[in-house]
Amino acid sequence: MNRDTFNTYHPILNILFFAAVVLATVFLLNPVVLLLSYTSAFAYSVLLRGRRAIIFNILYMMPLMVLAAGINVLFVHEGATVLGYFQNGNPITLESMVYGLLSAMMIGTVIIWFSCYNEIMSSDKVTYLFGRILPKTSLVFSMILRLVPMYKAQAAVISRAQRGIGRDFRYGSLLERARNGLKILSIMVTWALENGIDTSDSMKARGYGLKGRTSFSIFRFDGRDKVLAVVMGALAVLLVYGLFRGFFYFRVYPTVRWAGLSASSIPFYLSMGVVFLLPVILRVMEDMRWRHM
């Protein structure tokens, strides 16, 4: 379990936050909103995963965003502002470039947010939130969340065991390495199937999903959660008001139009930044509190 401050809050607040930031990133195709979301997601992922997040965000996400932006310019030629032409005669428009940059940034930002989500929303939180509403679905989803880290650990165990008896896939001829690799894969698949059956039988024996069944939970909605819920609710109401007032308006096609930054809109953008940076702010406040104590 990650020691992040936001991770210690109630799961309903965790999932509401991630749902809000992902929806805002996807549907508000606004450059300022996307920039706030991207920098916040980048900062939070670094707080959660450290050096691994920096490597992932720079070496994988940035090339992906550049590729996505380039593909949009190559294949989308809508827009009224023509900047030039390709050799085949297709126009290069300002609008396709802007939309490509924004959509690429949106895709990369959402992926980073989901990497943060995977660190915070553990399988027990998912089961707690959806176990009574969708017991079977929540069980399957919680198993999927555990799938990659658990399988990686088990694959390492099997690989070490095979290496101890001289059947590692790193040594020998190409045929021997392929045979040893297939052996490890076969053991891994067998273990995965047996593990799934054992989990299913175990949950069935405990009466999982039966009507009236009670379950133990370590999650309690305390006073600290209520304060954060009030803050998130107030920010949500403010931002919805700003949305209906048109402060976040941005249009790409047929021509680029933006409501712009003004004395009236800046407070709403600052509020949006506070929402995106909420986990980082909580982490900084907690660190300051501990240093003071």
Image (spheres, rainbow, N blue to C red):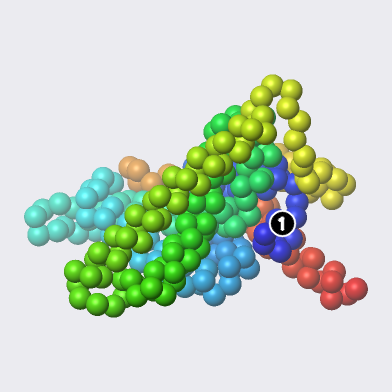
Q: Please determine whether, in this image, residue 108 is positioned above or below residue 173.
A: above
Residue furthest to the top: 211
Residue type of the residue flagged with mark 1:
Phe
Is residue 229 at all visible to an observer of this figure?
Answer: no
Q: Across the whole image, how many numbered discs are drawn on residues?
A: 1
Q: Is residue 122 above or below residue 211?
A: below
Residue corresponding to mark 1: 6
Locate the N terminus and report the quarter of the image it occupies: bottom right
> Is residue 274 toward the left or the right of residue 255 in the image?
right
Which residue: 36% across, 61% down?
184
| Residue 85 in picture, x, y percent from top left | 16, 57
Front-lying residue, 48 or 206: 206
Between 290 and 167, the residue placed more toward the observer is: 167
Residue 13 place in picture, x, y as percent: 71, 45
Category of crowding for the residue at label 1, using alpha-carbon neighbours closer than 10 angstroms: few (below 14), some (14–19), many (at least 20) = some
The residue that appears at 77% across and 39% down in the rendered structure is 216
Q: Residue at x 90, y 73 (%)?
A: 293
Q: Position of residue 132 (x, y in %)?
A: 67, 29
Left/right of residue 238 with respect to residue 167 in the rendered view: right
Residue 290 is at least partly visible in this image: yes
> Residue 133 appears in which quarter of the rendering?
top right
Using residue 278 as the reference point, say whether residue 59 is left or right of it. left
Residue 276, image quadrant: bottom right
Residue 39's x, y, as percent? 55, 64
Secondary element type, mark 1: helix
- Horizontal side of 86 relative to 71 (left or right) equals left
